[in-house]
Image: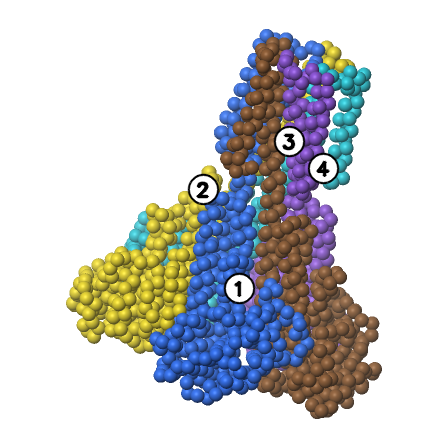
Chain colours: A brown, B blue, C yellow, D cyan, E purple
Amino acid sequence: MARNNGKRSRKKGLSPGTLMHVGEKKVEKTRITVIDYDEKTFLEKEIQAIEECFPFKDTSTVTWINVDGVHDAAVIEKLGGYFNLHPLILEDIMTTSQRPKMEDLGCEAIYVVMRMIDFDAERGQITSEQLSLVFGRNYVISFQEKPGDCFDPIRERIRNGKGRIRKMGPDYLAYALIDAIVDHYFQLLEQLGEKIEGLEDSLVTDPKQELLHQIHGLKREMIFLRKSVWPLREVISGLQRAESPLIRETTDIFLRDVYDHTIQVIDSVETFRDMLSGMLETYLSSVSNRMNEVMKVLTIIATIFIPLGFLAGIYGMNFKFMPELEWRWGYFLVIGLMISAGLGMVIYFKKKKWM
Amino acid sequence: MARNNGKRSRKKGLSPGTLMHVGEKKVEKTRITVIDYDEKTFLEKEIQAIEECFPFKDTSTVTWINVDGVHDAAVIEKLGGYFNLHPLILEDIMTTSQRPKMEDLGCEAIYVVMRMIDFDAERGQITSEQLSLVFGRNYVISFQEKPGDCFDPIRERIRNGKGRIRKMGPDYLAYALIDAIVDHYFQLLEQLGEKIEGLEDSLVTDPKQELLHQIHGLKREMIFLRKSVWPLREVISGLQRAESPLIRETTDIFLRDVYDHTIQVIDSVETFRDMLSGMLETYLSSVSNRMNEVMKVLTIIATIFIPLGFLAGIYGMNFKFMPELEWRWGYFLVIGLMISAGLGMVIYFKKKKWM
Amino acid sequence: MARNNGKRSRKKGLSPGTLMHVGEKKVEKTRITVIDYDEKTFLEKEIQAIEECFPFKDTSTVTWINVDGVHDAAVIEKLGGYFNLHPLILEDIMTTSQRPKMEDLGCEAIYVVMRMIDFDAERGQITSEQLSLVFGRNYVISFQEKPGDCFDPIRERIRNGKGRIRKMGPDYLAYALIDAIVDHYFQLLEQLGEKIEGLEDSLVTDPKQELLHQIHGLKREMIFLRKSVWPLREVISGLQRAESPLIRETTDIFLRDVYDHTIQVIDSVETFRDMLSGMLETYLSSVSNRMNEVMKVLTIIATIFIPLGFLAGIYGMNFKFMPELEWRWGYFLVIGLMISAGLGMVIYFKKKKWM
Amino acid sequence: MARNNGKRSRKKGLSPGTLMHVGEKKVEKTRITVIDYDEKTFLEKEIQAIEECFPFKDTSTVTWINVDGVHDAAVIEKLGGYFNLHPLILEDIMTTSQRPKMEDLGCEAIYVVMRMIDFDAERGQITSEQLSLVFGRNYVISFQEKPGDCFDPIRERIRNGKGRIRKMGPDYLAYALIDAIVDHYFQLLEQLGEKIEGLEDSLVTDPKQELLHQIHGLKREMIFLRKSVWPLREVISGLQRAESPLIRETTDIFLRDVYDHTIQVIDSVETFRDMLSGMLETYLSSVSNRMNEVMKVLTIIATIFIPLGFLAGIYGMNFKFMPELEWRWGYFLVIGLMISAGLGMVIYFKKKKWM
Amino acid sequence: MARNNGKRSRKKGLSPGTLMHVGEKKVEKTRITVIDYDEKTFLEKEIQAIEECFPFKDTSTVTWINVDGVHDAAVIEKLGGYFNLHPLILEDIMTTSQRPKMEDLGCEAIYVVMRMIDFDAERGQITSEQLSLVFGRNYVISFQEKPGDCFDPIRERIRNGKGRIRKMGPDYLAYALIDAIVDHYFQLLEQLGEKIEGLEDSLVTDPKQELLHQIHGLKREMIFLRKSVWPLREVISGLQRAESPLIRETTDIFLRDVYDHTIQVIDSVETFRDMLSGMLETYLSSVSNRMNEVMKVLTIIATIFIPLGFLAGIYGMNFKFMPELEWRWGYFLVIGLMISAGLGMVIYFKKKKWM
């Protein structure tokens, strides 16, 4: 779980609100891009000095400031200071192990933290990144840990002026970003679902221990996914209930929609968990079944041949006076006895359905 | 779970409300039928062009428009547009992996999604289809993924004017459709119940591994069924609590009735789950019991004959000077010793209740 | 579970409220008895034609109409029609797989469904029967599936005018009937409790597989009992909260009392479930313990005698040149060696606490 | 569970409120003592005739009437009648298998049932006794099943006039009695805790089956304890919320205190349950670990010596023509071969970490 | 659990509010230090006589009185008396097994109990200490069981006047102390997390029984940790909801922040629990896997060599007339037969995938 609590302890004892990056540093340099638009105008640029953002604060257009990299306290502090954000919010932005949550900062702004999840096919592991959103009357600021996100289709829609996005306010933009992340969860779940189905097939055909590790691995991913997704429900219903002037009534139905999607994601995660537990049981009983088969063979062989071997041993004894040894047909009698004893046992086992 | 999340990822990045079919395409061509009735008049026809439905919108009669096939965005959009449905609702109708839910669209209409479940006896698997219902002041529109449903008795009742259905409004029709689906669940549960009872009997008489797979299969069906049925409870209690003018007071008692049925369905699903878990335990302990019996036989045989074999081995040694070998009754003494040792062990095992 | 969902499917597609018996038919002919009383008068008679009940509807006395057998739609319909009961209520009365529930039918009447449970000692199984109660301003109608119930002491009390029952209204009578059923649960629980205690003792003294089946059987009975008892809690608290003029204030304390009893029944059922789970664990570990003991004996015998047998085998070889065979004391040396090796292993096992 | 439902069935069919003792009769003769006090006066006496209590009803002093033995309906009825208690309350007092509960009997009195738990060190079992408390404006009546309780320190405090008890009302006295019982739970938990720790140590050093029975025994005691303690929480929070004039505001903080203690007791019970479950797992895996060790030794011995024995068997064959038998060094070669095969297998097992 | 309920029983029967230390005595002499500050002034001193604290009560500065050691009733009583604390609060302070809780003592003061947790690396065990906080209009009193805490950074911040602490009131100081403790939990969780990850690696490479004990040990620590952390959530949300004038509005956001941290701690504890359960399963199936491998080798060896040994035994018999023994190639035929039988079985096992 080091991926979660990182080096938080480094920060112990500092005054609350002291800005210091907690978590893995995932990018070298902070990169800031601005997209500014209304129904008619559109502007997109990458920013060099943080001050370039400031003019956008009081325009009537919607401004989306995207910050890639949250390790640089100076940048976060300057931006936060200009947009009037409480130091504790800035601290949360820089501490990249937040649980998804939503905070209504009065009439000024709303703060949302989520986890952006990706599946690293190479390492076969889920990776996650913290996304912080702050949106106010006419701006949205998004903080990501590193470049690369699932927002490109949104950028494209804004550029092209397709859909309703250019006509709506920053609350709709914030919704669109949240929706993009939740949609991305579905993609992840499809990948995991395929992996689970693959495993399920192998389970029947060839139950190797390797599978066990994979099932346990997937179970752990589910624990992890669950931690990211469950609180999201409260986050979005928090947005729905927020009596903030920042969320227009027209956005309500969209929030309800993304809420439904979140429930569906949770549902799938729970179903996957149930399926994995079932698979574990199947695996264990397959293995024990195989073992039982092996043991049965041993039992049958040993149970038949040990008594027979004893019989042979008797007539291998070197006593001077053993009448049977002298008999003409002694040998054949014993062989006959052995065969009938063996057959008797085989029949007994067959009757008991052990063979 | 591919059956649930289908190809949702294909849609990732599109503007919310963009119409695009998500899910398996189950029918080639959309088919629309209209039933229009009041206490005295009755009209039923299949429609070719979507516009034929429009005149029914403002009549005082009740109109039931049934759409089989939701893959054609053009049809859904035209119909939805005429009946004033929000794009997100249309999107939900076309995304056939919705969780059962109910949405009050203001005074205009109420939207309900449910899952219509069927048991494919051939593949021994539950199949499910999404049913979307929209009902307004004087119409009900039902969207199904493919032709074939459990509504024929209702159609028959409308045609014949039997029962109260012709005297009631669209809310009663919507109730009747929901009720038909819930009643269909009972039928499915009876089938599953019989299958479970069959399994239970085989479990006692002949615990084969095949049964294990069947139990696990049924458990998975239960997980699936549960996902469809649990949310239904909220859906129907949502309809009961909805303070919509669209639901007349006289329908209340019917909704309460279908609510009770839903609870009963949930109850049965949970009971089945409990029973299946119990059967799993029974199976596992039956198997281990059998194994134990097998092992006991091995133990007894080996424990008796290995020492006896050793005894025979001793007198099979070729030492020059072994006084016993010369004895007149040596051989018979040894045989006697072996028999008494064998009997002694048998008695010991009997006393220990191992035999 | 056939006992629960019976042939409900036969009814699929009929208009809701259509009367048709669903469930096992347990009696040939419906039998109706009437008890009519107030503080001073008392009348008891068996009724032939349903119309004989009607005069009792508007008297100032309390009338208890008891119907044994609910398979005859004509009877139920006539009675229900006269007492103004909604068709859905009548449908519920005739569908004998209802979950316990309570419905406030406005000022007119209150409807309660419960399960009357009995223990069929012969088949060693719990049997259950549906009891429907409808009570109004001055009457109580009880519907049972078959004759025979636990109400005789109440009839006796009414006849004798003992206790407060003759002075109270129909709500008290309804309470008394419910109370009689709940009291009957206690009796059942005592029987089950004794059975469980008996099993527990056998478990320690002689863990046979037979016990396992009995434990699983009891567990299933508990699942079944639970389904009947849990909803009862809501039923009774529903009666307590009902702001109906039909329930006098003086009856409140009695309802609270029966509510407490219900909680105690639920408590006992849960405790029994816990105990049965514990017994299952005990059984399984007892069995595996026995198996381990058996295996240990095999291990010890085999581990001691296989090497010794090998030793004997060596000197049973027929090589021309084996110097030890010629030794004067060779045989005794080998026997001595075998005894000391055997003793050595016994000591080792004792030290390891395997013996 | 006979200890809980006793002979309740004997009472089936009697009119509710009929007084009849249900439960084990634990004492021969009912014994009543009265303690009457205010800040200045103090009186303590044992009462012969029930009427001696009556004068205390309307004094301004606080009167504590303690009744040991609840099997005598005449006594309970007389006392209850004088103090105006509802017959159902009296019935509860005489039915000694009540679940802890609290009932506000209007302005007159408050009724509380609890379980007084003791640890019978001899039988190693928890014993429990029902304590009923009724307190009104100036009296507290406590009903116990048998003499002997944990209230002596309270009696002592009243006698000596130490602490605040003489200055407070009957609600404080009732609180003090409840507090004494809850404190007694702590003592019991300490004893159980020590027992559990003792078991835990034995578990590591010497896992015998005896321990298993003890763990299961303790688990059952926990189930029992839990049933007594969980409802207590509601009882006390019921007292806190009761808007009765009988509970003065100054007593509130004391109730909150005893509520905290109850939570702590529940917490400990749950922790013990968790610990016992953990111990069970530890036990089972210890046992299976031991078994595995034993099996490994068998495997190794058998795997080494069975092939070697076979080798010896070959040269024990009596074929006329076996060239090796004639070789000068045949015997030594075979012995050498056996030693190297044995060593080879030992090395193989060591490498596999099976030895 | 002795660490929790200590010697509470010693106190049984004393009047509630009687001061007496319950718990382990962890320090010899009580040590009191005072820090008094406002934005401009700062004073820190160690106090000899308890009366030295009194003058600080009515100043306008913030006073933090820290008491190390709660076993001395005289000290606690004097201090509590001067600051007007209820005897039950003082009792709680001296009973060092409190569950975390918060009590609003009206306008006067707020009382908070928490557990300060530390990891004793030597004994590999979590140790815990009770911290009681009382804060009023201008003072904070903290009671610890022994010297040594995690508050040094706060002391440092006060001394240096860094951060906002010198400008805020006692509620902020109380918050800062709570925050320091919660931050300390994170540190502990990091340590435990590293330990768990270490275990996880060993689990795959070398599953020894030692690991099992460590996993169970960690599970117990989690039970313990959980008991300390879960109630904390209610404590802090209690502080948030408290409508006390003692908590200024500006402190609200800080409380919300520490609440979020508490949730994260709980989350991590739960995740660790899940992971440990998963590890337990992995361990058990690894062990059983190993055992299975060992057993398979035994089975294969025994199954091959027991029949072969029997064959050799046959030709070791000493019958006078055994024709094969006379054959020229008899020996070689038998050897050939043995080799082909052995190979046949190997091929069979390979085909069955048992080798």
Q: Amino acid at mark 4?
A: Met
Left or right, residue C346 beside residue D332:
left
Label 3 sits on residue: C349
- Quarter of the picture holding the C terminus of chain C: top right
The answer to whether dots 4 and 1 both sit on one chain is: no
The answer to whether dots 2 and 1 both sit on one chain is: no
- Residue C341 sits above or below residue B323 on the image: below
- Residue B353 sits above or below residue A18 on the image: above
The answer to whether dots 1 and 3 both sit on one chain is: no
- Residue A340 visible in the picture: yes
The first of marks 2 and 3 along the sequence is: 2
Q: Amino acid at mark 1?
A: Thr
Q: Chain of mark 2?
A: C
Name the one closer to the observer, E220 or B142: B142
Label 2 sits on residue: C210
- Residue D155 sits above or below residue A91 on the image: above
Label 1 sits on residue: B127
Front label number (2 vs 3): 2
Q: CA distance from mark 2 to mark 3?
A: 35 Å
For the point 57% across and 27% down, the residue is A342
Q: Chain of mark 3?
A: C
Front label number (3 vs 4): 4
Q: Position of residue C130 (x, y in %)?
A: 33, 61
Residue D355 - label:
4
Crowdedness of circle 1 by 10 Å Cα count: few (<14), some, many (20+)?
some
- Label 2–label 1 contact, CB within 8 A: no
The answer to whether dots 2 and 3 both sit on one chain is: yes
Question: Helix, strand or loop at disc 2?
Answer: helix
Residue B247 figure quarter: bottom left
Q: CA distance from mark 2 to mark 4?
A: 40 Å
Q: Position of residue B273 (x, y in %)?
A: 50, 57
Q: CA distance from mark 2 to mark 1?
A: 39 Å
